[in-house]
Every structure is written in structure tokens, then in C-alpha cells.
Amino acid sequence: MPQLLLELFSEEIPARMQAGAARDLERMATERLKAAGLTFEALTTFAGPRRLTLVVEGLPAATPDREEEIKGPKTSAPEQALEGFLRKTGLAREQLVERDGVLFAVVSEKGRATATLIPEMVERIVRDFPWPKSMRWGPRSPDSGSLRWVRPLKRIVCLFDGAVVPFDIDGIASGDMTEGHRFMGSGQPFAVKDFADYRAKLERDHVLLDASDRRLKILEAARAVCQARGLELVDDDGLLDEVAGLAEWPTPILGEMDPAFLDLPPEVVRLSMKVHQKYFAVSLPSQSGGSTAEGGEGGGRAQRLAPNFVVVANVAASDGGTALAAGNARVLSARLNDARFFWDEDRKVGFDVWAKKLEGVTFHAKLGTLAERVERIAALAREIAPLVGADADQAEQAARLAKADLASGMVGEFPELQGVMGGYYARLAPTPALQADPPHKGEGDGADLPPLDGEGGREADGWGDAVADAIRDHYKPQGPNDAVPTAPLTVAVALADKLDTLVGFFAIDEKPTGSKDPFALRRAALGVIRLVLENGVRAPMGSVSIYATSRAAEAADRLARSDDQWVRIMADLHGSVRTNLAGRLEKVLKGWNPYPDDGGSAHYAAVVQVQNVVADLLAFFADRLKVLLRDQGQRHDLVDAVFALGDDDLVRIVRRVEALGAFLETEDGENLLAGYKRASNILRAEAKKGPLPEGEPVALDGAPPEETALIAAVSKAGTEVDAALATEDFAAAMTALSHLRAPVDAFFTAVMVNSDVPAERDTRLKLLGQVRTVMGRVADFGKVGGRAFSPRGRRWLAERDG
Amino acid sequence: MPDVTTEPLSFQDLILTLHKYWGDQGCAILQPYDIEVGAGTLHPATVLRALGPRPWKAAYVQPSRRPGDGRYGENPNRLQHYYQYQVILKPNPEDLQALYLGSLEAIGIDPKLHDIRFVEDDWENPTVGAWGLGWEVWCDGMEVTQFTYFQGVGGIEVDVVSGELTYGLERLAMYVQGVDNVYDLRFNKDGLTYGEVFLENERQQSEANFHGYDVDGLKRRFEDMVAEVERFLAMTGPQGQALVLPAYDQVLKASHLFNLMDARGAIAVAERQSYIGRIRDLCKACATEWVEQERGRA
């Protein structure tokens, strides 16, 4: 079966675009072949520094003949309709076939030679190729229809079944000629016959076509050059992918650097190598095996770098790479000198100056400066500290220092080192950095804050490890695979940082939509959830969020409208919330009513605004939690069923979801759910006829035994459920409910709810209502069963309004 | 490091070699523009000639002034005044990459011995609203050239794509001569060093850049230059054309004044974007006018 080989040969394609280009080429070629009616056995694409290649195996020599019947007008249709149809099909009236009063045209299409279909197919792929960025070039660039490509396109190889498929795209004629390595090849273009010939000739001319071959060669050779000197390569997959896209004939070479540079933090050395020079770091042999590539996880420090690097050159130099390694070493040395300059200067400057600098740095136009954000995070960390077992003073202090390194020279150069550098500098800081006087004394707080220069964990040498660790790790977790900090102080600052981000952007209505999440709020929310769950933090997220939101809203509104009253209200709100942060949400809100006679006024509007933000935020948490639990195999509807209860303690929610999931998998659970739905349906139908009766059901004389049995069972289950929930023993609560299953089933089998006797109907509706209520204390069973999630948050606002 | 058989080029011979090479390719060898600029691209021979439909080939050395980069002559790699070698070919010839590699060989860099790489770097200069696609060219890990296919200038999409090459002359010379400190570069074959020519200049200019210039005076002159741009664009020459070339000169002066203010630390974070935006708008006004004139002359 014939083979198609296509090569699009260009000037250097950006490394980061190559993998995507291979995928796009595969997708587009598959679509085009299908659209042309061509089947194939296998389709493969390759991408490298100068070429995109497509090979399709097992194509037919021609498309099959096709006969198609096109439905036309009815025989009774007006003359114009018939004329139009004849024009469209190019047939005469007598060529049409009549069936059941309808005319049909039979159009037969001869199969076409595959080779004749290829030119248009390739042209469409080339012209429509979705490069992230593309350009015009050369003498043809003035033409509006001139070809766009990622960089100038130089050659097109197009062979079908061993023969050139001739065509021309914007002056580039297809052919069978390609080129090898830019410097190591023969220097002359050469002809290829088919894919096997192409691949072999490329390799002979020092081009490895397949990116995975290049990766493998780099990894093996890089490890080998290290091992030859008793060293270890520091693996880095991202870097490996990138350098595999920068060389057609990758050749790792070990270089040396001045060991004096190893005084710098290893993260700095590694990043200088990686970001600026695309070198791999090299480490001394690890004592007990297991060298971790990425630092940061606290473990990075355990690995000792060697005064070496691995550069992946694109040539096997004629001198074995001596000159090349020396040249690279000199460049690296200049880079590390720059880094050392920042390291030395930063340590002279220190936290006080940076803190001052942050006053001039805008975090977001609507959320104020970084200094203001630091104030909010510090206040929030202070409130969160007791909830996570951290010292409040120390948490505030760590938070106040956490963002300072953003103003340092090193982080300016390497933004990836935010936190990491702060950690180093805090450990080394020679003098106390905290100002006794916070830059912004809000009206509603400050007075009752303890003095900042108190017993904040300040030690003689630097800020102490706990504070330094908190500064270093407070950005974590940065993604689903990043480790979650466990040190209480770090947890407090990490939570405060993420919550301030979330409430801030929610307060100014910058929520993620669809695929757009420019402020990485989903990641922040997942971070909060993981910090809470993995550390078992018992925090009422609603109250914490109200506190955070009111502070952020204060900032947002001060900027937006300089409305003193609003600011005062917000200050009051977070002032009162902080006195009762551990309390349940409703109570916190009910307790806050500084202007009791001022309903419908600014204060009411303020509460509504904060409530809306918090409600949206809790719904957002629910959504993220659902994603997390779904990834762990939990049903998303169960999260809804539990969230609907209005709880905002994530740990409790997850425990409840787990217990509920286990219960619903039992036969009792499944049947009871059916009973619940039946009861709910009846109640809903009856509610339409008039108000449902309320109160305790009392068995009437002569009531069926199934009814009296259920009344007793519900009452008992209610007591047991309450007791179980009070101790958060959700498994026991489920067991209590399971005892309802038999009486509920029996009741529905034996008893008619809609009795003609009004007293009987009344009692039975009360009874069903009670079943629903008791079960509803455990979860909203109405949401179980795969219904779409609806944000619940507005609910308690509605209740307040009502 | 060139091969060992020939002596490495001195700084001035490097320039002369490039002049010869690009002159042979049909480039007009121009002299530096006589106004302070931050980059060789800003020379009207590049920024303005890249616009409009007429072909153009030129090469020149341009001193580049980056007041904030001064280090009092104490940093071996950073200067507030250095040289760029600038080549513009419009439209870009099909074999521009090969021509460029030829220029490296001409100055003694053997691509079989050294690692030459084209690493993605899409060049952009927001102050003149210019952008293009291309690479930074690495030689053994050092960026020696910016290689750009201009796609737009002054906020206007170009009629014809130019190829632009910007060589960092000091870096290239340091590389070729195997020197770690810029001031140790051999300037000529007579034992003169780069430091003997420029070290004192770096010391004095650094002090002036960081502490000397009168900020109020700079701000006043900036405003004056801005007013001049507008005035020149409103005036007409003998053929009725707007005086866009003198106007563009004033844009360059305003841009340099901004750089001086910046080095003096006189630009607040909040003001920065506004200054850059004003310069860009002036540049765009010049570019728009120039492109009209060029289309008329074509």
C-alpha cells in the first residue's frame, strides 16, 4: 500500500512550539484525509528544530468510485423548483428517477487518484496551520496573500508511493530534496525515496528526526559524561524537552565552573544555568542514592551541586568540544557573577527597604499596593494562626516578611525564586526587620493588636527557621502535584496568602470564566482546600472568608470611591468577625449589627456585598472540592448534597461525603434513598394543593401498625442522628438512618398517604415531612443522584432577606 | 576563540571586517547617527527605512546609550555606552541565515568548532512600537546577535519584511579575542585597549547619569522636545511634506531624556507607562507620516 511522506523544512522553529506543531500536523492531516475519503493504516508526525514531518502508511492508490442519490423536488412541485434542481445537479429531466412522487438525481463520482488529492490537502494544512505566532518574509511579503509560517519556510518534500507529488505553495515547489544538519551535514541538499530512506539519510547527515530519540540520546550521553567523572546529572524533564528542540544532533558536553560559585544558594546556581543558558546542573554523588532534581521541597538543600554543568551542543565539535566547553564556561561565569552581585547587594539591603519599596508596587489597580496586600495577609495570618496551631504573633510577623523578596534584586532577575530567596535572606538577616509601626493603621483595628515588636520568634541569628520556612514555602502548593506544607506557621501564612488573593479578586469581580483564569484562582482555591484537608485544619471557611473579604473590600473600595463610611463599615465588619472567627457563619453575621436601625442603608449594602462575595467563593470552593474528590473517585453529587447543608468546614464536609458515599453503596442506603425520593415527591405534590401541615406526627387511634412503627422509628433515628452529628460521627449517623429503611419501605407498602380522612392525611404528611427533615440533617438527599450542581451560596442571603 | 593559526581580530578590525563583508553584499555602509539612542535599531536608517515599499540595504555601527547600565567601569560586562553593529536588508534575502553565518566565519568563528544556535526570541521595542519574529543567536551559550524579521514598526505593519541583524560588538570581540573583561579588549594592533579609550568615559558618565543630571531640567527638556515633535509634524517642507525627519530627531532626544530621568530614579512606577506611552505615540505619529511619504516616493 502506498506511503505519503511530507516534510516542511524551515528556519529554526521555537523549541516550545514543536510538540504542539507535531500534534497539530497529525490532527489536520487526519481530518483532511478523512474528508477526502482516504483510509490509511498509520499516521505519524515528527517535529524538530528545522522540520515538520508527516508519514502516512497504507493509503489507497485512489479513492473508490461513489454513487450518490440526491433528493429533489416532488413531482407536484412548481416548475421553478425543478429547474433549480436540474441546474444544481447538471442533469436533464429525463435523467432523474421518480419514486413515491419524489424526483431523485443519481450522481456517480469516479474515484480519484490519491496523488491528485494531495496538493490541495497539503496547501490547506500549510496555509491554515495554527502556529501560536507566524510571520511574513522576503520579497513576497508585500502580497496580502503571502504565506505565513512560524519562520521562513524553505523546502517541501512531498512523495506519494515513491514519486514526487508536484505542486507549489507561494513559490515553494514540492520535490524530493531535503537538507541535513546545518553544520555537520554534507552541506548539500539530497534526494530521498521514501520514509525509511529519508530517516536513514537524515541520520547519516547528523539529524535525529524523532524528538524522543533526541531526548534519549541527551539523557544517556549526559549521564555518561557525568558518570565518567563520578558525578550525577540533575534530571530536569522540562529542560530536557527544551534542549531536545534546540539541536538536531544533540551532543552533551561536561563543562567546569569556578567552585567559588557554589557559595550561592543551589537554587540560584541551577536557575542561572537553566533559564539563561539551558544547562543541566550536576551534583556530587548522593550519599544514599535518590537524587531529587527539583529543590524547594526542603530537600533541595540536601543535594550538593558539583562545580560542573552539562551543555547540550548541536555539534560534535572537531576538537571534542574543548573550545566549546570553555566558551560556555566563560558565559556561565559572567551569569553567575551577575547572580552573585544580586546576592551580595540583597543581603546589604534587607527587609526594611524592601517593605518600603512594596508601597510603590501595584498589586492590582483595584486592590492597591503590595504593601497593602501584605498588611491584609498579616492580619489574616494572625486570625488563622490559632486555627492551625500556630503562634499568632509569629504568623503575623512571617506574613509581614513573606512578600519582601519581591523587591529584591535576585527575585527581580529570577521571579521563580520568590519565597525561596526570602527564606534565605530571613535566615541570614542581621537586624530586626519589622517596623514597630505598621504602614496602614485601619480605623477598626490596630488598637487591640498586640505590639509588633513583641515575642515574635526573633532569634539572635536571622528570623529563625520557622519564620524562614514559612516565607520560603508560603506559595505552596503551587499545583496538584506540589507538596503541601505542614509546619503550622507556614500553613497559616500560606492560607492567608491564598485567601487574600481569592477574596480580593472575587471582590472586584475578576472570577475565572471558562478557560480564562488569569490570576490562577483555581490553583489558589485548590491550594486552600489541600492545605486544610491534608493538615486537618478545622476552620469555618465562611467566617474566615468574611473576615478576609471585608478587609479586601475595604481596600477595593477605598481605592474605588474613597468612601469613608464604607471603609468604616468594612472595618467594623472584620473587627466584629474576628472576635468570633471560630463561630458558625450565620451566628457571626447575626452577631454583627452595629447599625440596627439602619436597614436598607449603606451598612446593609455592605453586608450584602460581602455576603455575595463569600457565597460565590464558597461555591467556588465547593466546585474545586468536587473536582478534587472526583479525581479521588468520589461522586460529585454527594459533595453537592453535603454542601447544601450550609456547612463550611471542609474537613467535616469531606468526612460526611465519605460516610454518605459508603452508606449509599449499601442496600439499605440505596433503598432509603428511593424512599426519600418518594416521600419528597409526595410532599412536593401536596404542597401545591396548600400549605403542608406542620408539627409532630401523633399516631391516631387505629392507625396501621406500619404507621406507628415509622413514627417511633423516625423519632428514635432523629435522636440518634443528632447525637452522632454532635460528635461528628458520620458513620453512626448513617447507621441511624439505615434503621429507617425497613419501616419506610413497610410504610409505603401498607399505608396510603392521601387518605380521605383529613386527620389521617395530616398525620402522614407530617410523618413524611419528619422523615425528610431527619434525613436532611445528614445530607440533602434531594441532591443525590447526579443532578447538576447549583451554587448554593445565595441561599443564606435569601433567608436573610426573607 | 578563533582557530589558533591567525591572530584574533582587534575591535576595530572586527568592525572593518563586517563593513567589508556587508558592503560586498550591497549594503550602504553608513556612519553612526549623531543623536544619542538606546539601540542601533532607532537610527532612522532602520526604523524609518523599514517602513514603506522601497528596498533598502544598509550597515553601520551605532553607539548605544543605556544610562542605567553604567557601572563606573567596575563591571567587566556592563557599559552605559557601547556599540552595536546593525545590518538591515529589505526585503530580507532568502538566504539571510547563510549570509549571517558567513559573516561569523569572516570574523573567525568556525561553526564546526563552536556551537551556533538560533534560539527563539521575538524582538519587541515597545517605545517605538516595533516587533518582529526571529532569534537570538548563541555562540557557545553567549548571545552574540539579535536576528529579526521585522513585522511592524511604529505600530504599523510593514509593507515589506526586512531582515535586521544586531551584533553586540563588545561581546563578539570579547569572544573572538578570548577576553573576560571588556576593558582588556585589544582595540587595534598597536596595543591600545578598549579601557584606554573608554574607561574614563564610563566613570564620569556613570556619575553624571546616576547623580549628576538636573532632574527638573531633564523634565523640562523632555516637554520641550515633545512640543517640537508636534510642531515639526505640523510644518511643511519645500515639497509640501511634513517635517517628519526633524520630528523623529526630537523623538530620539525625548527618548534619551527619559532614559536619563529613569537612571536618576526620577520616574515613579506609576509614571513610567505614561512616559513610554507618550514616546510611542510620537514615534507612531512620525512613522505614520513617513510611511505615507515613502509610498508617495515609491
Image: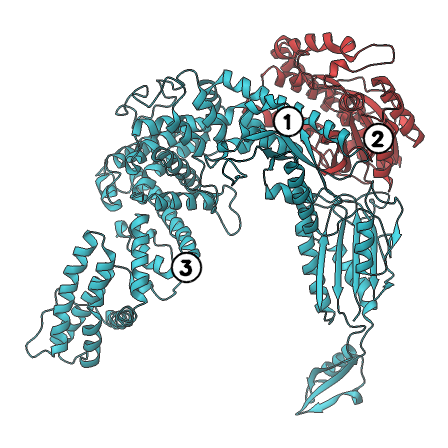
Circle 1 residue: B276
Query: What amino acid is labelled 2 in the image?
Result: Leu
Q: Chain of mark 2?
A: B
Residue A636 in the image: state x and y as whole percent: 39, 59
**In contact (CB < 8 Å): disc 2 and disc 3:** no
**Nearest the eye: A582 or A605:** A582
Residue at the (73%, 48%) spot, across then down: A48
Q: Is residue A142 left or right of residue B81?
A: right
Circle 3 residue: A633
How busy is the neighbourhood of tag 3: few (under 14 within 10 Å), some, or many (20 plus)?
few
Of discs 1 and 2, which sits in the foreground?
2
**Nearest the eye: A388 or A555:** A388
- To the question of a shared chain for discs 3 and 1, the answer is no
Q: Is residue A153 left or right of residue A332?
A: right
Residue B51 in the image: state x and y as whole percent: 80, 35
3D distance between C-alphas at marks 3 and 1: 53 Å
Q: Is residue A356 left or right of residue B254?
A: left
- Image colour assigned to chain B: red
Query: What amino acid is labelled 1 in the image?
Result: Ile
Residue B122 in the image: state x and y as whole percent: 70, 37
The quadrant of the picture occupied by the N terminus of chain A is bottom right
Report helix, strand or loop for mark 1: helix
Work out whether A639 lies above or below B289: below
- To the question of a shared chain for discs 2 and 3, the answer is no
Work out whether A697 lies above or below B123: below
**Could you tell me if residue A364 is visible in this image?**
no
3D distance between C-alphas at marks 2 and 3: 60 Å
Query: What amino acid is labelled 3 in the image?
Result: Gly
3D distance between C-alphas at marks 1 and 2: 35 Å
Circle 2 residue: B104
